[in-house]
Amino acid sequence: MTLTPSTDVVTRELRGKVLLVTLDHAPVNALSADVRRGLLAAIEAADNDPAVKAVLIVGAGRNFIAGADIREFGKPPLPPALPDVCNRIEACAKLVVAAIHGAALGGGLEVALAAHYRIAVDGAKLGLPEVQLGLLPGAGGTQRTPRLIGAQAALDLIVSGRHAGAKEALALGLIDRVGHSGDVLAEGLAYVQELLASHAPVRRTRDALALSDRAASLAAVATARAETAKKSRGLFSPLKIVDAVQAAIEQPFDEGLRVERNLFLQCLDSPQRAGLIHAFFAEREVLKAPETRHATPRALNTIGVVGGGTMGAGIAVAILDAGLPVTMIERDDASLARGRAHIEKVYDGLIAKGRLNAEKKADIMMRWQGSTSYDALAGSDLVIEAVFEDIDVKKAVFAELDRVCKKGAVLATNTSYLDIDAIAASVSHPQDVIGLHFFSPANIMKLLEVVVPKQVSADVVATAFELAKKLRKTPVRAGVCDGFIGNRVLAVYRSAADAMMEDGASPYQIDAAVRAFGFAMGPFQVVDLAGGDIGWATRKRRAATRNPAARYVQIADRLCERGWFGQKTGRGFYLYPEGSRHGVPDPEVEAIIDTERTRAGIAPRTFTDDDIMRRYMAAMINEGANVVHEGIALRPLDVDVTFLYGYGFPRYRGGPMKYADTVGLPTILADIREFAKEDPLFWKASPLLIDLVERGADFASLNQTA
Ligand code: 3HC
Ligand code: NAI
């Protein structure tokens, strides 16, 4: 029997004495306003109906509840508020039980904590991940969790935002029972019957006693505060979480809820929340490239990699880690042995850290085979080429692939800069050729630029996205140009940094300003880490085609001429005494810079950190706009995800294009026009940026159009 009125998204059904309340709001039962309304109405109905002795809350589909509806944040609030719904659930006079499967995250777990008893089935994921969105649990989570499981465990869960499985949740005291049958509804109903039969009392989490040792709880808060201050690098919400949990210890429940609310609203208002939520949706949007909507991926059971150097070996590890077999091709036996050794080194490192054992490593290596003959690739579904960055070498490799690979095999290149259209044109089936631009170290870095040449067929693009999924990479669709999205934009803001260095800022000041902005490393640290010789080789290659009118800063060349390639040679922009990975400023480098300034006839001037970041970001944003304007990136958000996942851009700022919207595009354009007074060739405003400013629009307005 169905009691009316159920809503579309929350249905009620009386099962004997139990009111079964099912949230059915695809895809993840997020707690949108109508779900909250339906839930509230269900609890009211239960309280008002003498036939109802207990309420069982379950979620339809694959999850219990994924949390508050993130899409509502930043918009005017709609009643009823989630904290009120949770309080109402907790106040219910009838027994309320939550039966959890899949995700019970954020507001979803808060609903469960407001229930009187909780059961979760195997495979459930419980957590309060709000911190990852720049928030804190805002529906009682910071008050109920510590009361239920203690301050220390609650802080660990909420500050990290991690998920706990059903078994761990039981051990923590977050839930009362684990069901093993896999049928959440049957488990939930049986549990409610059992509670009713044993006359289990209504039991409210607000009255739970895990904080009764006040001194120990406050000590846990003090420790968490110190650790969080150290680790949370510029993030706003983690310390607010500690404040909220402290209030749970020091204040009565209702007052604690008020403190939590206040802190939650502060987080909600912060630009970090907007940046992190932009990142959350952007990393999901990039998966929906046009080709993935209508084309079916080809098979991906056997993969070949040509080249066992830095990238080939890293890519092979990524493939092995996904459980797939890999065939590696190298030039000769010695190179092949080196390629295998590179791979083994990764796994030996894990063994040394206790994260793998020798037996597992042997199992993994069973899936690796190597050869110096391309014939070994005859059965491969996909081959990824990662040989030297030289178009003739690459074309020769593709000619071999063309000869040996089966019909329909996908042929991919990991080139950083070369013209993939030209590579495709050199084989007999150009529609099978695509760019798969991994980042170093390829087994760790999440970004995968899927570079789409003119002639490629849609199912090959879909296959690339499928590969990314299998390898747990974040794919971004990019068009063919020099450097695709990431390296093309990088080249421009690197030039801006070089110009500032020559004009008077030290590389150390620039790096420090960039770190203070939130990047893990500054541009000159990155050069030292990657090896200055790589960029030097590229610069030499391009010298002949460089626009002679363009400014060219030679400082990096002066360092490379001395063999100072960075960490691997013990010095670059920084000194690395005795193999240290931590660089220290080098007075000799500063002297070289001075000499270069004199040579170039430049009187050095001072830059504030703000001056540095304005130029650095304007260069990045302007080239990002060009990349969108030319259709190299589908949308601004694709540029954002590229930088978040491949270039260490601070996630809480959402990416360069989101950051530009936050600052305001007119401000960015005005900066560019001001900088153009010194160097009009370099600081040429992107037509897209000009157009958006003229229309009073922002980058976000272009994010819906893929
Ligand atoms: N609100 C709105 N939409 C959501 C959402 C949410 N909380 N969680 C997921 N979605 C959307 C996704 O954007 C995606 O939409 P799309 O299909 O249009 O791209 C769709 O649901 C499916 O999501 P996933 O692709 O991520 O599906 P998975 O099965 O891979 O993962 C999940 C499911 C583990 C639930 C994952 O989506 C997730 O981690 N969601 C966010 C959980 C979270 O952060 N909750 C806390 C919210 S803040 C809060 O609750 C505040 C409260 O304290 C007041
Ligand atoms: P690397 O020099 O470390 O490795 C290249 C490997 O290719 C060597 O082991 C070499 O023996 C092998 N090789 C050369 N010619 C071959 C042939 N004809 N057949 C089989 N093997 C051959 O170079 P790295 O750094 O791994 O770069 C490879 C490719 O990846 C390049 O195109 C590079 O631009 C690109 N790339 C490099 C990144 C990096 O950070 N190193 C990042 C992203 C892409």
Image: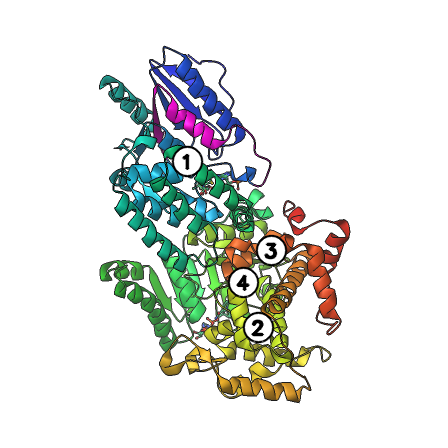
Q: Mark 1 points at which residue?
A: 255
Q: Where is residue 163 in the image (x, y as percent from the top left)?
A: 36, 44
Q: Earlier in the sequence, mark 3 or mark 2?
A: 2
Q: Give the range drawn in magenta.
A: 74-101
Q: Mark 2 points at which residue?
A: 391
Q: Can residue 63 be seen in this view?
A: no
Q: Name the residue under label 4.
A: 517
The nearer-to-camera label among 1 and 4 is 1
State the separation of the CA atoms marked 2 and 1: 68 Å
Q: Tell me the residue at 24%/40% (across/down).
A: 171
Q: Position of residue 662 (x, y in %)?
A: 62, 53
Q: Where is residue 614 in the image (x, y as percent from the top left)?
A: 63, 65
State the separation of the CA atoms marked 3 and 1: 36 Å
Give the total number of marks visible in the rendering.
4
Q: Earlier in the sequence, mark 3 or mark 1?
A: 1
State the separation of the CA atoms marked 1 and 4: 36 Å
**Do the numbered discs 2 and 1 sit on residues whose CB atoms are within 8 Å?**
no
Q: Position of residue 157 (x, y in %)?
A: 35, 46
Placement of 686 over or under 219, stated as above or below = below
Q: Residue 659 bears which disc, if any? A: 3
